[in-house]
Image (spheres, rainbow, N blue to C red):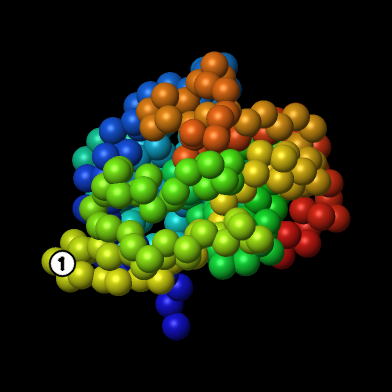
Amino acid sequence: MKKWYEELFEDYAETYDKQPFTSGTLAEVDFIEREIGYDKSVRILDIGCGTGRHAIELARRGYDVTGVDLSASQLGRAREKAQAAGVAVRFQQADARQLRFRGGFQLVIMICEGAFPLMETDEENFAILGSAAAALEPNGKLICTTLNALFPLFHSVKEFLDSNPAEGCSRDNRFDLTTFRDHSLFEAVDDSGRTKTLSCNERYYAPSEMTWLLKSLGFRKVEVFGCPTGNFSRENKLTPGDFEMLVVAGEYAAASAIVARCAG
């Protein structure tokens, strides 16, 4: 039986590219470039690359990029867009929980909940972080975004989603304070015009959790920021008003036993 995120992205590529948050791509890539000092020798892995919006823009700017995603549909759209843009990106279909990369990259990105934190269990989400860490060279860096657990402690997730409509609607939201998971029904119309109703289960993370998880994987420095779409900046202090957080983990020194277990 397919998971909700597999079913959602099965025929959703064109619809995804029309989502409001995709308008922030260029500014988000600006931030990524600043974080690596505009060093064109940096090899980049984009986990949960979707239709390739960050991977393609980075390649357009001269970077060596590999993009992985679970969805064949999303990757098909990504390859079409890369060809139209005249850039080369290595797109691969793979499960982020079980990537086989062992070093080779100086930067890993997971933007806009690319795989993490969509899994149904904390162990699966942690395995994705382990895969990301295993792909890095020593002193490599991870840049990711994830759902901010401070937000639902002070605000209604349902009200936020209702006031920020996407190509679909979310209803019956039930946020569990003991697990930091939001359970909801999400209705979306796919590229073929079919309406899907999906039972979603997403994990929100506290900044202290992200720091602990990443340090346990061998990152010596973990920084957390607020995350407005298209406005990634070290000047954005994380607050309970931020629906998402931006995490920058660096100075990677592999904690080999833990990373090996997580990366399978």
24 up-or-down from 18: above or below: above
Residue placed furthest toward the left: 193
Task: Answer with left or right where residue 130 lies relative to residue 96.
Answer: right
**Which residue is labeled 1 in the image?**
192
Mark 1 residue element: loop
Q: Which of 86 and 220 is in front in this view?
A: 220
Which quadrant of the structure image shows residue 112?
top left
225 up-or-down from 72: above or below: above
210 up-or-down from 174: above or below: above
Residue shown at 25% from the left, 57% from the top: 168
Residue shown at 26% from the left, 47% from the top: 165
Q: Which of 220 and 198 is in front in this view?
A: 198
Which quadrant of the structure image shows residue 70?
bottom left
Task: Answer with left or right where residue 165 lies relative to residue 25.
Answer: left
Tally the marks.
Answer: 1
Residue shown at 55% from the left, 35% from the top: 240
- Residue 36 spot, x, y in % from top left: 58, 22
Task: Answer with left or right where residue 249 lies relative to residue 256.
Answer: left
Residue shown at 41% from the left, 39% from the top: 55
- Residue 137 spot, x, y in % from top left: 71, 38
| Quarter occupied by the C terminus | bottom right
- Near mark 1 (Cα within 10 A), the count class, few <14, some 14-19 or many ≥20, is few
| Quarter occupied by the N terminus | bottom left
Three-letter code for the amino acid on which mark 1 is drawn: Ser
- Residue 30 spot, x, y in % from top left: 43, 21
Residue placed furthest toward the bottom: 1
